[in-house]
Amino acid sequence: DTGVSQDPRHKITKRGQNVTFRCDPISEHNRLYWYRQTLGQGPEFLTYFQNEAQLEKSRLLSDRFSAERPKGSFSTLEIQRTEQGDSAMYLCASSLERGTGTEAFFGQGTRLTVV
Amino acid sequence: AQSVTQLDSQVPVFEEAPVELRCNYSSSVSVYLFWYVQYPNQGLQLLLKYLSGSTLVKGINGFEAEFNKSQTSFHLRKPSVHISDTAEYFCAVSAYGDDKIIFGKGTRLHILP
């Protein structure tokens, strides 16, 4: 297993279009996280799953954003009706829940540019 | 809710000199603490973590950090930096019983020749 994989690495889209990103976590990891990172900022938490259940969503996640993790494996993050403010790096991370602190492993991200 | 403050957005330091990157956190409950590094055009990588026990934590690439509960700090140190340490460093916190990780805004480490 080579780690967390994200696809695509880059996406350019026109304002108003829908986009979908995919994340494949480390195979035995039951937790999966989505973060957003803009220039000069740290990663901002968006949402996370334990297996297929979405446990928490940030207030940053407007109703144009939806995330799924069917069957508790890969996850998708969809943004509908994209806006220029959605331009950012979208990071996925996964971890193995052990109840004693969570070390998350990150993918290289999908860079979204909305024009 | 937890929060993290990284006091310096950029830190310039000469090669082979020591460096300290400062981090303070806020939480009403006990926390786990992390430092992640992001090299240019690469993903986030864990440097070190504090879960419990000894307050001095050693990580990869010669970095270490000290947890200070009374000062709610988790500063990162390296006794002698190398040009390859040029990167952005993120301090992060996760509360007991809540496994989402909250990040600071990052500190960019510039190594001067």
Image (tube, coloured by chain):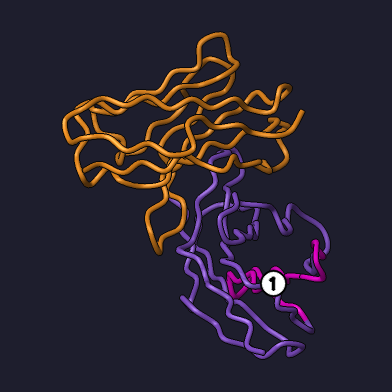
Q: In this structure image, what is the colour of chain A? A: orange
Q: Nearer the viewer, residue A32 or A88?
A: A88
Q: Quadrant of residue A47?
A: top left
Q: Is residue A54 magenta?
A: no
Question: Residue at label 1?
Answer: B85
Q: Residue furthest left?
A: A16
**Chain identifier of the purple chain:** B
**Residue drawn at (50%, 21%), measured in percent from left and top?**
A75
Q: Quadrant of the N terminus of chain A?
A: top right
Element at label 1: helix
Say left or right for A113 vs A17: right
Q: Amino acid at mark 1?
A: Asp
**Residue drawn at (77%, 70%), measured in percent from left and top?**
B64
Q: Position of residue B9 (x, y in %)?
A: 46, 75
Q: Nearer the viewer, residue A84 or B80?
A: A84
Rendered position, B10 above or below A98: below
Q: Quadrant of residue A74?
A: top right
Q: Nearer the viewer, residue A41 or A112?
A: A112
Say left or right for B30 vs A14: right
Q: Is residue B65 magenta?
A: yes
Q: Position of residue A55 (x, y in %)?
A: 47, 25
**Residue drawn at (41%, 60%), measured in percent from left and top?**
A41
Rendered position, B38 above or below A54: below
Q: Chain of mark 1?
A: B
Q: Please rate how many residues cluster around mark 1, counting C-alpha atoms within 10 Å: few if below 14, some from 14 to 19, many from 20.
A: some
| Count of all numbered marks drawn on residues in the image | 1
Q: Which residues are magenta?
A: B58-78
Q: Position of residue A45 (x, y in %)?
A: 44, 43
Q: Position of residue B82 (x, y in %)?
A: 75, 79
Rendered position, B54 above or below B95: below
Q: Quadrant of the C terminus of chain A?
A: top left
Say left or right for B89 vs A80: right
